[in-house]
Image (cartoon, helix red, strand yellow):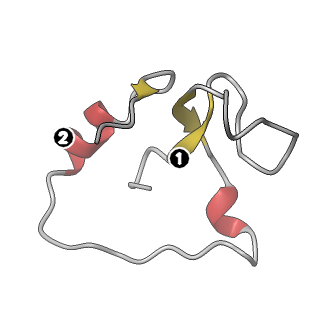
């Protein structure tokens, strides 16, 4: 979460995990819009200093796929 973007991992195009059923074994994951999630009681956000917020916003492109690499 930055001042202008709130994003997180979830099923591609699926919004926020836990709002619907996904198979954890076959679901492709992407960066999804999580706007407003920080307002829920069960969500924790911790500030991180000395970061380039514009760079973070650019990297949080909604729909960008996430790939697990070993």
Residue placed under numbered mark 2 in the picture = 55
Residue at 18% x, 40% y: name it. Answer: 55
Reading the chain from its start, which is encountered first: label 1 or label 2? Answer: 1
Q: Secondary structure at mark 1?
A: strand
Q: Going by the picture, which residue comes out furthest to the right?
A: 20
Q: In the image shown, does 11 or 6 lie closer to the viewer?
A: 11
The answer to whether residue 6 is above or below residue 58 is below
- Give the residue displayed 15% in from the left and 60% down from the top: 51
| Quarter in which the C terminus is drawn | top left
Q: Check disc 1: other Cα within 10 Å, few if <14, some if 14-19, many if 20+.
A: some
Residue displayed at 70% across by 35% down: 15
Horizontally, is 64 left or right of 13 in the view? left
Residue drawn at x 50%, y 73% as measured from the top left: 45
Q: CA distance from mark 1 to mark 2?
A: 16 Å
* Residue 26 coordinates in the image, percent (x, y): 67, 27
Q: Position of residue 49 (x, y in %)?
A: 19, 73
Query: In the figure, is residue 28 to the left or right of 46?
Result: right
- Dividing the picture into quadrants, the one containing residue 20 is top right
Identify the residue under disc 1. Answer: 8
């Amino acid at each position: 979460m930055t001042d202008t973007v709130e994003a997180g991992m979830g099923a591609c195009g699926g919004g926020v995990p836990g709002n619907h059923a996904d198979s954890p074994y076959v679901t492709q994951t992407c960066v999804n819009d999580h706007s407003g999630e920080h307002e829920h009681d069960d969500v924790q956000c911790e500030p991180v200093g000395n970061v380039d917020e514009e760079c973070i916003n650019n990297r949080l492109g909604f729909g960008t796929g996430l790939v697990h690499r070993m």
